[in-house]
Image (cartoon, rainbow, N blue to C red):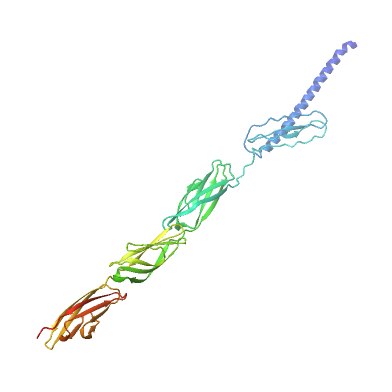
Amino acid sequence: MSPSQRRPERSRSKFGFVVVLVVVVVGSITSIGISAAGVFSSATQAATSDTVGGGDQTSVPVQLGNGGGDQTSVPVQLGNGGGDQTSGPVQLGNGGGDQTSGPVQLGNGGPESSLSPIAVSIARSGSPRYSSNYGVVSASFSASYSGSDGSGVTIDWSGVAGTNSGVSITPTIPCSSLPGTVTATAHDQTGHFGSSSITLDACPTPIAIGVVTGNRSYNANFVQLALAVTSSASGGLAPYVYAWSGANLVYPSSEPTTNLILTCQLYATEITITATDANGQTSRTNVAVAPCPGEIKVSTSSSIVYSGSGSATVSLSSTILGGQGALTLKWIGPQGWTSTQANPTATFACSALPSVVSLYVSDESRHFSSSSVNIPACPAR
């Protein structure tokens, strides 16, 4: 065979060599691609074991080398969570040189959530408001919070204020349940919660008033009464303001200890003392006033029996009303006659008649009254 005939054959051999080489290179690339796929599969499984949820995944560009030198790092972005994931470089190689390993960064669904407590604080506005003489108390409370994004936060109240909801409450609390605490608890939709409490002191004790009455004295004819009184309040919140009142009180007074001037009455009456404390709460006490004795009223009468010996026997009688305390009586008649009996009998000589016999009456307050009877002369014989 001539040389000119063999040249085409050599050309076919070269073409066949090129085909074989391409097949070998493609096969290598395919093999490398399969190996890289195995690496990504392992990385993805490792990330999946640490995360939950699923979001859109970022594509993974892979750069493969086919030479014998160091390989260029390959950035790989993987994610399986709710947000975009940070890329992580992966270095792969298929050549003859040493390969540099590439760290992989995997996402796990965004920032970790933590159930840190919500900070709650309670404020009390205004002063407590008490019912009559400290039966119940009303107070206003409000709650504020921090540590939550504010999504769906609810506030529940408990304790001596009862069960309530809302940022602000104004409960009415029986004083018998105090001292005690009021608690506010805040919850949000993510499960965060927190609480705070405020302590309420006991209510003041009810106001009580003690009154002691002292001496009684009267003016002339028992028109007015001066009554000594001493009062003192306890409970509530000092200081106290006092006020005396009554239908027959001549001069009102605001002194706890004083002499009250009253109009005398012949029947029992009452006066009232009111004590008001610093919280504006009041208490009242009634004081009984005994009837005034009234003006002393005396009436007298007599009966006379004359004897033939020139004398007259006089039987005296009296009726006495009014006066204070024990009464003192004294009869005075002619010839220096006296008696302290209410209904005495006296004998007078006819020579001393006619005359007058008088009865004088006084009481412990030195009020007095008198009455007289006439004793006529003895009949002529």
Find residue 96 and report its horizontal and vertical position in percent: 83, 31
Q: Which of 260 and 41 is in front in this view?
A: 260
Q: Residue at x 23, y 85 (%)?
A: 336
> How many numbered marks appear?
0
Question: Is the N terminus in the top left, top right, bottom left or bottom right quadrant?
Answer: top right
Left or right of 353? Residue 133 is right
Left or right of 98? Residue 171 is left
Q: Which residue lies furthest to the left in this view?
A: 381
Q: Looking at the image, can residue 292 be seen?
A: no
Place residue 152 in its image quadrant: top right
Q: Which residue lies furthest to the right in this view?
A: 3
Question: Is the C terminus in the top left, top right, bottom left or bottom right quadrant?
Answer: bottom left
Q: Nearer the viewer, residue 101 or 302?
A: 302
Find residue 222 and report its horizontal and vertical position in percent: 30, 70
Find residue 347 and report its horizontal and vertical position in percent: 18, 85
Q: Nearer the viewer, residue 182 or 136?
A: 136
When the figure is inspected, residue 285 is found, relative to residue 192, above or below; the finding is below
Left or right of 75? Residue 246 is left
Find residue 374 and report its horizontal and vertical position in percent: 17, 79
Left or right of 33? Residue 381 is left
Q: Which of 119 and 37 is in front in this view?
A: 119
Q: Residue at x 82, y 18 (%)?
A: 16
When the figure is inspected, residue 380 is found, relative to residue 259, above or below; the finding is below
Place residue 373 in its image quadrant: bottom left
When the figure is inspected, residue 125 is found, relative to residue 301, above or below; the finding is above
Q: Looking at the image, can residue 143 be seen?
A: yes
